[in-house]
Amino acid sequence: MISQLIGAVLLGGYYAVLATGLAFMFSVMNIINLAHGALIVLSAYGLYVLGGMMGLPIAIPIMIIVMFVVGLALHALILARASKGGELLPLLATFGLSIILDNLMFQVFGADSLSLAPLVGDLSWASFELPGFIFVGKLSVYTLIAAVAVIAGLEWLLRRTTLGHRIQATSQDRATARLLGIDTARTAAIATGLALATGVIAATALGLRTAWGPYAGSAQLLFAFEAVVIGGMGSLWRVLWGAMILALAQSLAAMIHPQGFLIGGHLAFLLAVFWRLRGGAFSLNRLLGREVRT
Amino acid sequence: MSAQLVVTRGGTTSRITLALLAFAVIVLAATPWFFGVGGSGRAVALLVYVLLAVMWNALAGFAGLVSIGQTLFFGVAAYTTIRLSNAGLDPYLAILASVAIGAVLGYVTSLFMLSLKDGEFAIGMWVLSSLAHLCVNLDPLIQGETGTSLISLNGYAIETRSSITLWLALVLTLAVLAALFALLRSPTGAAITAVRDDELGARSIGVNVIRTKRIVFVLAATGTAAAGALWLASNLNFQPRAFFGVHWTAYMLFMVLVGGLGRIEGALIGAVLFFVIETFFASYGAWYLVGLGGVAVFFALVLPNGLWGWIGPRLPGEAIPTGYIINKSKT
């Protein structure tokens, strides 16, 4: 029981890394990127190919740079255009993109499930032993640490750096930000790039903990989205709590019924929706919970 | 001599459109005699696409609600049809009952889902669809992803069965289209158009936005449920993944974006175009889906009003008139 609880908390670390990029992009650009999951799976394939050639420790930083550039391109080619046409078009365009990516990855890499685990020796099954014969997977501990580091890094960036203040200004009022001399298009593009760069961390965790196939993206998108909704807004840290509640709900439901894992997560999401019925709008103001300081 | 205002609700273009639609209905109804069982099956597929496109367009184009999870209603209607006919109900009555259940499910869902905004609503519906998919898989009758068949339909001879399914599909499609047309021409239709064009503005002149959206949402749920039950009656096999799969959402997105968001004519053109493309290219598998997604994204970014956005303004008058036409005539 205790080891299952610990396992759920650590699984929450994985969901938190997944969800941070989605929440960050949503709060900055007001766009829910429906291709978020597909882009993470794309990063995982990138890590698989590069990692096979030069090892994972070198592949991860390279992929972070690659996905940052992909993010800049995504903003320039699709998001900037779509967000001019109202709230619906970004949803339609990113959903279309996810369909394209899913099926392209199927054509290029086939239906086989791949895993990054062979690249890291025994890390994916090695564990720490706690007193009382409780074993905790090393990988999931590292994932949780990575989640905390990613969230702390983004929070620090938003609150303490000039770029972060530019991002906040852009998210609050683009026209005024432009009047103040901020290049809003460039700022939004950088924010997209950062969101996709965090996706590489998520992809590393995904590839090490399970085998994935070309269509794994939609499940990852749903996990990320549920974690964001359950956590609510106030700070990126709430995404971490939301992710842990999601993981706990899934683990509890799995104890009740062998096929209950996913159902438990969906029910927790529904409860969260009922909880804040007609309340709580997402916005960066709420996310940060305070005014911008320059 | 004084100028008088004459208000009409149609014109030559709409009469020609009506004649074309009537001709299409007659051809479709006569399919069993000309093209046999196979032809009837294809005709049902076309009608299902029309239902899905028109309903998704009503939701996204009129109510401003993009839903990734309309498969909730599509899949649940197929499932309830299986369940009810397994309990001894005639399969065709089970289809009609499932359409009614779809309407009720739509109403219940609307009570909490409509409080979510844009993207949250879109993925929230996907979560609901996924939840329904998982719950259906738990039913021992369905045997998980293995699925089952609408066995009781075998009580009818294959020619009888395919003809009845086609005519039922035709009647349901026409009923849903007529309901949408009547709704758009009623005072509520003006409210729907106002909400589509400017939600805040509509609210400020006294439109009850949530009520308006709920009417469209429930209608869309009903029509999508009809499509799901008919797809089952035409294909007999119920594999949960084939009904709850996200590829259906990709089809709806393609049909509506290519045809033209926010116009019934656009959805109809999109459905017919998709039917033709699917007939020729579905065998290309994943590349076919890549192409559909690519075309949809292209239209979203470059031609957000779709094909009808280009054709419509070039016609004299409206093809499917939902507004009022005011002419000055001298008497």
Image (cartoon, coloured by chain):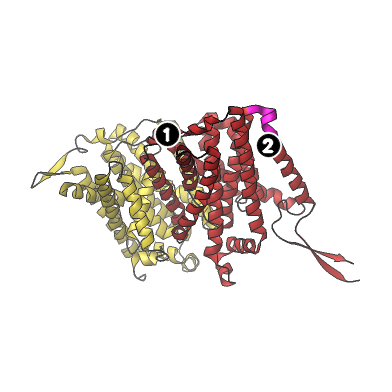
Chain colours: A yellow, B red
How far is the residue under mark 2 from the one under mark 1?
Answer: 30 Å
Q: Is residue B279 visible?
A: yes
A137 left or right of B82 in image: left
Identify which residue, A156 or A107, lies in the foreground: A107
**What residue is shown at x 61% (from left), y 42% (from top)?**
B271
Q: Position of residue A227 (x, y in %)?
A: 33, 54
Identify which residue, B22 or B292, lies in the foreground: B22
The chain carrying label 1 is: B
Residue at the front extreme, as displayed: B88
Q: Which residue is mark 1?
A: B147
Screen quadrant of the C terminus of chain B: bottom right
Q: Which residues are magenta?
A: B27-36
Given the image, on which type of amino acid does mark 2 rest? Answer: Leu
A260 left or right of B76 in image: left
Given the image, on which type of amino acid does mark 1 rest? Answer: Gly
Residue at the left extreme, as displayed: A131
**What residue is shown at x 44% (from left), y 63% (from top)?**
A170
Q: Is residue A231 magenta?
A: no
Q: Position of residue A47 (x, y in %)?
A: 33, 38
The image shows residue B330, relative to residue A266, as above or below, that is: below
Whether labels 2 and 1 share one chain: yes
- Predominant secondary structure in magenta? helix
The image shows residue B326, relative to residue B161, as above or below, that is: below
